[in-house]
Image: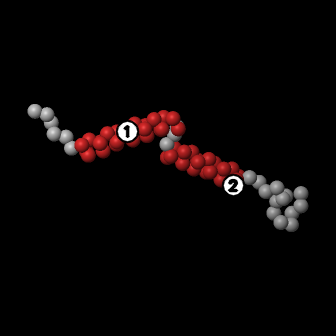
Amino acid sequence: MAEIINLNQFRKRRALQDRRSQAAGNRVRHGRSKDSRAHEAHERDSEARHLDDKQLDRDGGPEGESA
């Protein structure tokens, strides 16, 4: 005797598998994850802030002092 199947569940399961395979293809095609992009942006901002903190003033030093 044949197994009884709920067609709604079957369609939903098939649609879910299709979406997952589409998502996997998109991940391969478009590269890195959102987390890795955010991590790289944070590192880049952190390095820029670090360099800005180390930059010397170009106006010749403290007020009243001339070079």
Q: Residue at x 10, y 33 (%)?
A: 1
The location of residue 61, given as percent across then percent down, is 82, 59
Residue 67 occupies quadrant: bottom right
Q: In what element is the residue under mark 2?
A: helix
What is the image's colouring? secondary structure
42 left or right of 1 in image: right
Give the CA distance from mark 2 to mark 1: 51 Å
- On screen, residue 64 above or below 56: below
Return the mark for residue 18.
Answer: 1
Reading the chain from its start, which is encountered first: label 2 or label 1?
1
Q: Position of residue 3 (x, y in %)?
A: 15, 36
Q: Please state which of residues 63 and 7 is positioned toward the viewer in this rendering.
A: 7
| Label 1 crowd bin: few (<14), some (14–19), many (20+), radius 10 Å | few
- Residue at image coords 51%, 35%: 29
- Where is residue 55? Give x, y as percent: 74, 52
The furthest residue to the left: 1
Residue 39 shows in this picture? no
Res 56 quadrant in image:
bottom right
Residue 55 visible? The answer is yes
Q: Position of residue 60 (x, y in %)?
A: 85, 58
Q: Which mark is residue 53?
A: 2
Q: Amino acid at mark 1?
A: Asp
